[in-house]
Image (cartoon, rainbow, N blue to C red):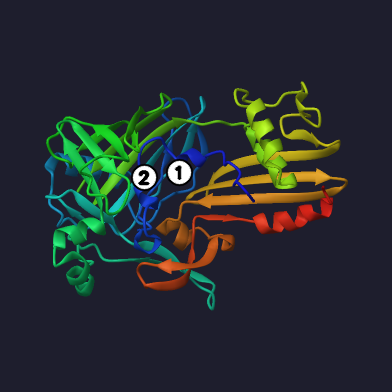
Amino acid sequence: MKKAYCILFSALLMVACGDDNSSSANDQELSSSSEEVTIESSTDEEIVSSSSEKKEEQNSSSSVQEASSSSDKGESSSSEVKEKSSSSMGIISKDGWITTVKIDNFSFFDEKYLRYYFLEEECDYDSTTNTFKWVTEDYTGVFNRYDRSILEDEFNGDSLKYMIWYSFGYKMSNDTLYECDYIGDACETIETATVYIGSSKSIFSTWECVGRIYHGEYSDIPPNYKITLTLTPKQRTTRTSYLTETSTHPTEYCRLIYDLFKDEEKENLCDDYFRNIDQITADTAFISNDIWLVAKDSNIVYVSVNNQIFETDISQTLDMRPSQYSLSTQKVTYQGITCTYWNKNVDITQQYCEEGNPDLDLVRNDYSNIHHKDVPMLRGYSENSNEFEECIKQFNLK
């Protein structure tokens, strides 16, 4: 499919501040990062699931408390890493706000140069026994990824340049902390980074996100986001509160039009029409002479293109099993034939790996920074775009 369909809670992965550095540079050098997500209410609360949740080997309440106390002490990197996560609960407030707490473990943190890298953790799959195993590298506290030949040949023995090239970095300036996005960025001239402010002279404290710098241009954090970052020598804890949307945005149907007809002009016309419109109603939306949309009810939308009428049903759900799990499905019916597209997102945590009856749709061969080769492992995203594309061929569209 040309574009992946939006997921109701995809904002968890694309927050206004933070975490861009987990997807930068060389895929084989990037850490899978250890993180824990807790959804909790900030106002009147409605329990979504009482299932426990964890992302990749950290404590929920105990780790957050530890982060706060450690930041005050500025303790050294000799502290031990927690080996098991406590349970947490998924809650969404009645007014649509949710809060996530995400913990990323460091494999090392250099306090002098403010460089760090994430602890490698993954959920490996054994097809012979149909079992999953959580695998993690040892916490070292110091940078120890040297390849001596590369150090000498490419960096002339300069271990600092070598460390910078293979790590992420922060920069402190008075009361401002810059979290640079990309591995290998020396963070001297800030081009792309998340911006925080705080009152501590030590980096190991709690910082409030105020905005982003992208390609040298600064923008404030959106008003519907509140984000804090707590750093210790062993981990970073990102707490994000944001307002969710509960309905499918009309532009999702524009994506559908493209997927059916592979016509960017029709897609762009649809996008332009719904640019400032948040929902499709019972009043027919006439986009052009040959494109219109109308809502039958809260779930069903009829899409007409070239006098061909499609019944569509797009839905998104969030669950805790025990990790945060989101599922987006799209059903399209034409002349009695129904095709369904789905995508799944799940936070791969130690608890989900060992106790959550993992979804085999999420298993694929991928490069492991622990084993240094491709191995079958549990990944956080899966979809059936190929099956969907084959199915809609039965529509015989022109």
Task: Classify residue 390 as left or right of residue 55.
Answer: right
View extreme (top): residue: 283
The 10 Å Cα crowd at callout 1, few under 14, some 14 to 19, many 20 or more, is: few
Work out whether mark 2 precedes mark 1 in sequence or the reverse, and give the earlier one.
1
Q: Give the side of residue 62 with respect to residue 378, left or right.
A: left
Which label sits on residue 13? 1
Q: Where is residue 148 in the image (x, y as percent from the top left)?
A: 19, 73
Which one is in front, 46 or 206? 206
Percent x, y of residue 267 = 68, 37
Residue that appears at 22% across and 40% down: 68
Q: Position of residue 189 (x, y in %)?
A: 23, 41
Q: Which class describes the residues within 10 Å of circle 2: few (<14), some (14-19), or many (20+)?
A: some
Q: Please determine whether, in this image, residue 184 is positioned above or below residue 44.
A: below
In front here: 320 or 364? Answer: 364
Element carrying mark 2: loop
Kindly tell me whether residue 393 is visible in this rendering: yes
User: What residue appears at the point 28 percent right and 38 percent down from the top-left corner?
Assistant: 229
Residue 282: percent from the left, percent from the top?
Answer: 76, 23
Numbered disc 1: secondary structure: loop
Whole-Å distance between the Cαs marked 2 and 1? 8 Å
The type of residue carrying mark 1 is Leu
Residue drawn at (17%, 71%) of the image? 152
* Observer able to see residue 107: no
**Quarter where residue 334 is shown:** top right
Q: In this view, does 129 lie above or below 260?
A: below
Amino acid identity at mark 2: Asp
Answer above or below: position of 107 versus 237: below
Residue at horizontal 46%, vertical 61%? Answer: 353
Question: Is label 2 in contact with label 1 (beta carbons under 8 Å)?
Answer: yes
Residue annotated with mark 2: 19
